[in-house]
Amino acid sequence: MKEDIEELLRNLKEKTWGDILGVAVVRPDGTVMASALPREIGEKRFAAMALVVLGTANRVCDELGAGNMVQAIIDGSKMKAILMSAGEKALLAVLASKDANVKSALSEMKRASTEVKKVMAKY
Amino acid sequence: MKIVVFGALNAGKTTFLERASKKKLSVKGSYEGMTTSLDFTRLDYNGETVYLFTTPGHRRFDFMWEVLANGMRGAILLIDSTVGITEVDREIGGLIESKGVPYVVAVNKSDLANLSLDMVREGLGISAKVPVIPTSAICGNGVDEVLHRLMELKNERRGTE
Ligand SMILES: Nc1nc2c(ncn2[C@@H]2O[C@H](COP(=O)(O)OP(=O)(O)OP(=O)(O)O)[C@@H](O)[C@H]2O)c(=O)[nH]1
Ligand SMILES: [Mg+2]
């Protein structure tokens, strides 16, 4: 399963022409299932932080009655982080360059998250 | 006013929060019982609104301790009496001390084990001024007392400022 997901992540990075610098699939307990991240990013830390942000964003949506959370985007002056859930058992966390085309990154991420869900369902 | 419940993995922080607020949390930031973001509730204490947060206990999320400590006016350190004082407890104790806010140590799961309060004090290396109170978040024993003592400490401090 790890291999299938790693393959998926490589595809995602290739399709976005350098906009996406790194990706990780994170389990609901905050551990890493698979990742393709730049060397300088600590994957454990990134995964745990992604889960906390997404969990908290979920909470905010709930508290405000904002409906289902679709994704969380953190806009840094040097990089972006885009987070979305990929079914009940995983979340997809992406690091993108500061000038990345968010719209196309999001649509590729949605596709990838559906694939992740499918892979997970097989096991 | 913001109060944060700290403690090691599985010490009973989330249960404590539910007991203190006397309601089940509608949404918990958790997965299979482990808190992975935070829990939050609002309660009224003698007309004062208290915002009560819990931190995740797992080391993986230790960056959240500092994040949640930001702006807190008081803290509760929950000890798991079935485990005793560990390195994590000492580290969290040090973090709370460094913030200079009033805090109370709750020796939780007192229904299961009988941990000596002096040993807790010694293990954490805390001053005699810090209240150490046995609690059971499951049965409810001591929970109100912890809140009460914390609010007292806070008001004393306010008086001397
Ligand atoms: N017997 C007993 N069990 C307790 C008590 N407090 C909590 N528990 C149990 O201990 C387990 C962990 O409780 P939680 O409240 O989820 O602990 P936590 O500190 O929030 O855990 P993390 O958020 O993952 O760090 C649960 O099964 C609770 O029912 C207590 O006072 N007595
Ligand atoms: Mg908890």
Image (cartoon, rainbow, N blue to C red):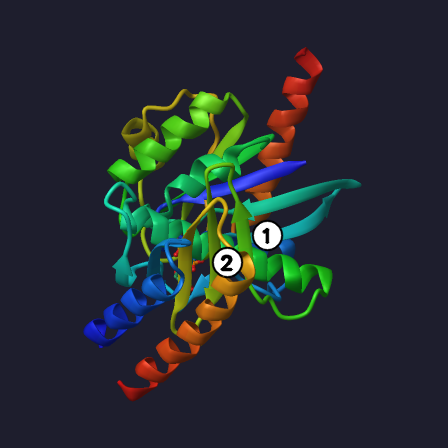
Residue B127, compared with residue B51, is above or below; it is above
Residue A114, compared with residue B85, is above or below; it is below
Which residue occupies 35% across, 49% down? A46
Q: How many marks?
A: 2
Which secondary structure, mark 1?
strand
The quarter of the displayed image where residue A31 is located: bottom left
Q: Callout 1, which amino acid?
A: Phe
Extreme residue in the bottom direction = A122
Which secondary structure, mark 2?
helix
Specify the quadrant that holds the C terminus of chain B.
Answer: top right
Q: Where's residue B134, x and y in %?
A: 44, 44
The image quadrant where one finds ligand 2 is bottom left
Residue B11, compared with residue A63, is above or below; it is above
Which residue occupies 24% across, 76% down? A4
Give the residue at mark 2.
Answer: A54
The quarter of the displayed image where residue B6 is located: top left
Q: Where's residue B58, x and y in %?
A: 34, 50
Give the residue at mark 1.
Answer: B40
